[in-house]
Amino acid sequence: MCGIVGFIGKSNAQDFLINGLKELEYRGYDSAGIAVVQDDTIKTYKAVGKIKNLEAKLDNNINSSIGIGHTRWATHGKPTELNAHPHLGVYSYVVHNGIIENYKDLKDELIQAGHTFVSQTDTEVIVHLFEYYYNKLQNASKAFEQTIARLQGAYSILLLSQAAPNSIFFIKHGSPMAIAKNNNGDILFASSDAPLIGLASDVVYLEDGVSGVASNTTLTFSEDVSWTTLPVSKQTALKDGYRFFMEKEIYEQSNVVADCLLGRVNDEEIIFDELQNNDLNNIDEIKICACGTSYHAGLTASYLFERISKIRCSVEIASEFRYKEPLLNPNTLFIVISQSGETADTLEALKMAKNAGLHTIVVCNVDNSSMTRLAHNTILTRAGIEKGVASTKAFSTQTVVLWMLSLYFAKLRNQINSTNLKQQIKLLREVPKSLIVKDSIHEKCRRLSKRYLHGHGFFFIGRDIFFPLALEGALKLKEISYLHAEGYPAGEMKHGPIALADPELFTIALMPQNLHYDKVKSNVEELSARDSTICAISPLPFELEDDYIRTSTQSHYMLEFFEMLVVVQLLSMEISIRLGNDVDMPRNLAKSVTVE
């Protein structure tokens, strides 16, 4: 997601800022900007799109020793230069990762005090609040202290001001921030290790609540900090200590889903700025089209659209849809899903739908991709770059977006009352917690993996929305372990596949407590009676299982869904590792499938 860099020292700040932002490109962004101090004046440069667009705007005659920079992925407000960071007050600039939850109240207060806002973002309140307090106190350090005391939410902040032109003020609260120093006396700031490696040897990773100020001569913290040694490898740093990018991305899901929710949920409604000014009231059907993991996210969503929005929903595999001569109704909303926005079959299906006069939406992770340029509306998943070929966080963010979309349409169609909507929003806000990887669960998957390296195949089984999750679990295992696996509706096992049951058939049973538990239990008993090896994933122990991965007791099946998603991802990864496979780059596969 968003990235932060900052520099104060003897070298050219502009060079570090641009190179540092390039090192953070892997996180995903839609705009970028820097602010540098030149002769006690702050100059700013911002651009939408790639960093090369920002570079084209730079003044090469600038030779500043102080500056801050940022790559932004839009949460509050569209990707425009006005909404890009750094944000300006009258004489100060700020960059910020995270969310200011009380920004509306602060903004109203500041407008009443005479401050003028130019962006749609929550970030801009920070710089105006700082200037409000500086105008009263005439002390930059105290003004910054007063400012951060008023902020609610999760954030990391760097602030420059002509009130203290040789200083950078900083705070970390719920969003990463690292500060490094080198033998030249330079102080470097970044939201991850990557921009710092090779330029400094010592680093402090700020704990929540730690703030301070850096100048040309001093670096002070609000409390004691611990310095450590930076990694020597950029590739290692990008993995953040994980063995594989896939492992890192499984662990990232909690944070990226939290980012996905930012600005889209409040206590009483779902907000999609992307859909404003569109007349969707006449839609009487939804058709979802996707491939692979994205197809499984769409299949999950079909249950939610019909259950919550009370609207007909069908799901098509894009490679089949293209050639079936489909009947397309102009009152059908056509939703395509793609991590990359370049998937060839899905892109062609989108073209067909648009040419037929259907309203189109793409759920995508890559802004300015082919699909985002073509569709009428784009909803970005904000998952950041996914380096592992086997998708993980793409699936979780796509599913969350589609769940929110089902609630959005339910409200639009008057199919949900305010009490139920608030309950659903409360559940959405609990999803990041359900996606946190528990050490005990990961260790159990690691230990069990050695038991599942042979046999003639796997069945992943589930009912309702846990059927698409079973499909996704089987796909993950196939992709990275090269073992045969199928996802199947649990109730369909007796209609043929149960003939395969024997001790060498491994059944991964998804058994949520809050949705059809007894039905799934009955299906698993049928397999157990035929000697299939059973691995039950459930909060409730099942006396016939051979292996048991115990999940948390949750209040709702959707929270169980996301926790079980993590389990099947981890189990597939650990089996692949045991087999000695390249987890991040499985054979025969590409990250973005741009051919038929």
Image: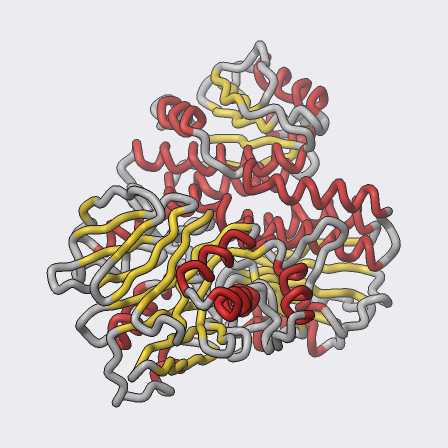
Residue 240 seen in render: yes
Q: Position of residue 49 (x, y in %)?
A: 46, 76
Q: Who is closer to the viewer here, 533 or 172?
A: 172
Residue located 67% across and 67% down the image: 361
Q: Position of residue 161 (x, y in %)?
A: 40, 72
Residue 289 seen in render: no
- Residue that sits furthest to the front in the current view: 137
Residue located 49% across and 73% down the image: 87
Which image quarter is the N terminus in?
bottom left
The answer to which image quadrant residue 79 occupies is: bottom right
Residue 192 vertical placement versus 116 (above, below) = above
- Left or right: 547, with 221 as reference point: right
The answer to which image quadrant residue 440 occupies is: top left
Residue 450 vertical placement versus 100 (above, below) = above
- Left or right: 412, with 394 as reference point: right
- Residue that sits furthest to the top in the current view: 543
Q: Who is closer to the viewer here, 102 or 558?
A: 102
The answer to which image quadrant residue 120 occupies is: bottom right
Residue located 59% across and 60% down the image: 337
- Left or right: 532, with 583 as reference point: right
